Image (cartoon, grey):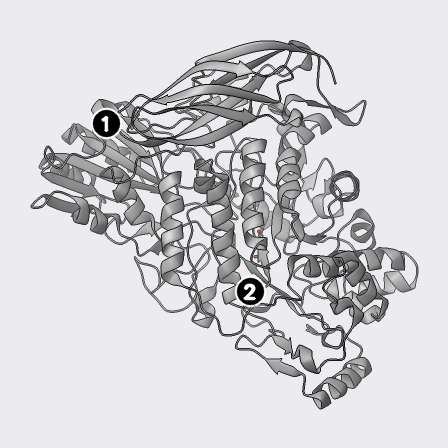
Amino acid sequence: MNYYRPVHPRVLGIACLFLCACGVIAANAQGIAKLDKSAVPSRSWMDQSLDPDTRADRMIHEMTLDEKIQLVHGSGWGVLRAGDPVAPGHNGGAGFVPGIVRLHLPDINLADSAVGVRMAALDSRYATLLPSVIGMAASWDPDAAFLYGSVIGRELRAEGYNMSIGGGVNLIREPRNGRNFEYASEDPILSGVMVGQLARGVQANHVMGDIKHYAVNDQETGRNTLNALLDERALRETDLLAFQIAIELSHPAGVMCSYNHVNGAYACENDFLLNQILKHEWGFKGFVLSDWSGTHSTVKSALAGLDMEQPGDDKFFSDPLKQAVLNGEVPMSRLDDMVHRIVRSMFATGVVDQPPMPRSVVDPFRGRDDARKIEEESIVLLQNSGDILPLSSSKIQSIAIIGGHADAGVLSGGGSTQVDAPGGNAIDPRPGTSTWGKPVYFPSSPLRYIREQAATGARIDYDAGNDPAQAAKVAGAADAAIVFVTQWMSEGQDAATLSLPNQQDALVEAVAAANPNTIVVLETGGPVSMPWAAHVKAIVESWFPGIGGGEAIANVLFGRVNPSGKLPVTFAATERDLPHPHITGQTESTGNNGADAAAARDQLRNFPVDYNVEGMAVGYRWFQEKNLTPLFPFGFGLSYTRFAYSNLKVDGDAKSVSFELRNTGAQAGDEIAEVYVTLPAPAGEPFRKLAGWKRVHLAAGASQRVEVSLDSLYLSIYSTSKSAWTRPGGDFLIEVGGSSAQLPQRQSLRLSAR
Ligand code: BGC
């Protein structure tokens, strides 16, 4: 395979001769071509006082057609596919685009990094595993999201990468979606804000950021073939709104288009999504890159707005695109636009002026501390009967810890997000990078930290939980039992049901029957059903908790940390209450990933997934509209203290709301105060929508007047007849409180249309 095809050999030869003669090329530890700036004759685009667009234009002016083509596709599967050639300069990530040495343009080295840098162990490197993105979103803390992105950006740089592939902002429409742990929430505003802050954090480290998978890639079953159907208004107000907010906040270098079709056209050749909305309406200045093998055509994709094919075999944006430009099917101006978008993003993010430092290393302890801090804000306390938590060392002298490999570590999510565990998988250590499809545990043992924090002399027993009867015996002999339950989730497959796998419901029931003080700690990719909820005292959702997870969980159980996370998704009691009780396309004979397998045989086959069933009523809105009671509602989460709301005031034009928040309990804590708006009836949206929130820290007994500003977009609807967002006139209801289902403060006000 000709993976390094780009530059005409003569041009390359002359350039190399010139540069080598000047002695200007060096190679850093990661093999990245590096230029000694002092020895290079100054190029006008290297003038840092110029804006990125001018710099890009000046450079492109000097480029040959081959050099332009070189920049708009990757160099093949490289390390992702055993046996494939790895291009020189490739840093071991999922993608590589060779730079142009003679023009001073560095290579682009892309690494999957949704929850930390992937495949670091391939090269004996270390990367921090952060809590899952859904967990980070459960903190509702934009600063935590920024920190999250900063850890990723910092470590990418230290490992020699200059582009992150992450920033999943797909809406959690399907609670069984295998990738929900990579996404933020079921609400477009919460998702957009949190993922936008994450991408800002990445780019603050002079690493190009990415937002993905554009758009409506909301289930894994049949992801390569499915046709997501969603009317324009619903599309704009839900899935696209999350992208819009994240992109406006972070100005990412890249937006990755998804595998699926959207309303009939592949996302990566969808003129409406790419040209009309993303680039024209939202003014996105970066480049659109395809998901890996998500490009399906040359001319159609190029004209629809795709700027870079990844991973770029020899298929569409290499020689075929060159031919299409030469024969006029794709205008040269369009190729220039593609290249401009890539190069201007490299200048804008500092990738050219501040390249990754050679030979720097990741600081594992700093990463671990950041991961733990984020996890401590992400853990959601779902139930706490009789205030059994925090565990009191005077009352609890013996604890049985059951299941979930709690003795060894914490679970991580699978697929292209998989970070390599230091020392290998904690339950099956082997050298090298992780194996696709195999659950990986990270060495942060909850058992160890529980032992450390339990009362001196307390007895802590561990049982693996493989046999419910045996586990019940161990639990029955202790003052309290803590059951760790897990739900491994991965890219490429959805869960068939909301139930915990491997008969863990039976395990919890058995333990709960044996010990009245049973506490369940969940490590899940998203919502699960809990038929045993009424039989246990406490329930703690820790998501996939990251490398600091074991300690963070123990800190919450023993009260060193007062839990403050709130659910970014609804936990339904049963799949019967979901808009799609069965995942479309998922059958027993095809298995979870059946339609994906079929896609390989027949790329053109597609099947509809009708999201118009719920349309705008995603998640909690569906539950309200259908008058269904979930197991745990969106926005819900308990604390070891209590908060009271009073005295709501809404300013005349609903630009902001303010209210009194008081900590009425005996200890300090953080409250996430939520503001919801219900639009006037003619808007046709019979549900409340999140419009703003604030995370507030209050000492015991303290109170504060809290102000939350409301973006007028969030009080608007998308009018397809006007092709614009408009605020309907009429009576708006504003509600404030600590959960979407408990909003003690409310006020209605009449607003004029706008
Ligand atoms: C995933 C992307 C990922 C890419 C590269 C694809 O299968 O959908 O999210 O970035 O692979 O690994």
Q: Are marks 2 and 1 in contact (CB under 8 Å)?
A: no
Looking at the rendered structure, the kind of residue marked 1 is Lys
Q: Secondary structure at mark 1?
A: loop
Looking at the rendered structure, the kind of residue marked 2 is Gly
Q: CA distance from mark 2 to mark 1?
A: 45 Å
User: In this rendering, does residue 487 appear at all?
Assistant: no
Q: Is residue 153 left or right of residue 216?
A: left
- Where is residue 450 shown, x and y percent of the image? 20, 46
Toward the right, the furthest residue is 328
Rendered residue at 69%/41% (across/down)? 261
- Mark 2, residues whose alpha carbon is within 10 Å: few (<14), some, or many (≥20)? many
Q: Secondary structure at mark 2?
A: loop
Q: Is residue 322 above or below residue 600?
A: below
* Residue nearest the observer in this picture, 622 or 511: 622
Q: Which residue is mark 1?
A: 537
Q: Is residue 294 above or below residue 64?
A: above
- Where is residue 468 shown, x and y percent of the image? 20, 38
Q: Which residue is mark 2?
A: 93
Viewport quadrant of the C terminus: top right
The answer to which of marks 2 and 1 sits earlier in the sequence is: 2
Q: Is residue 393 above or below residue 613?
A: below
Toward the bottom, the furthest residue is 21
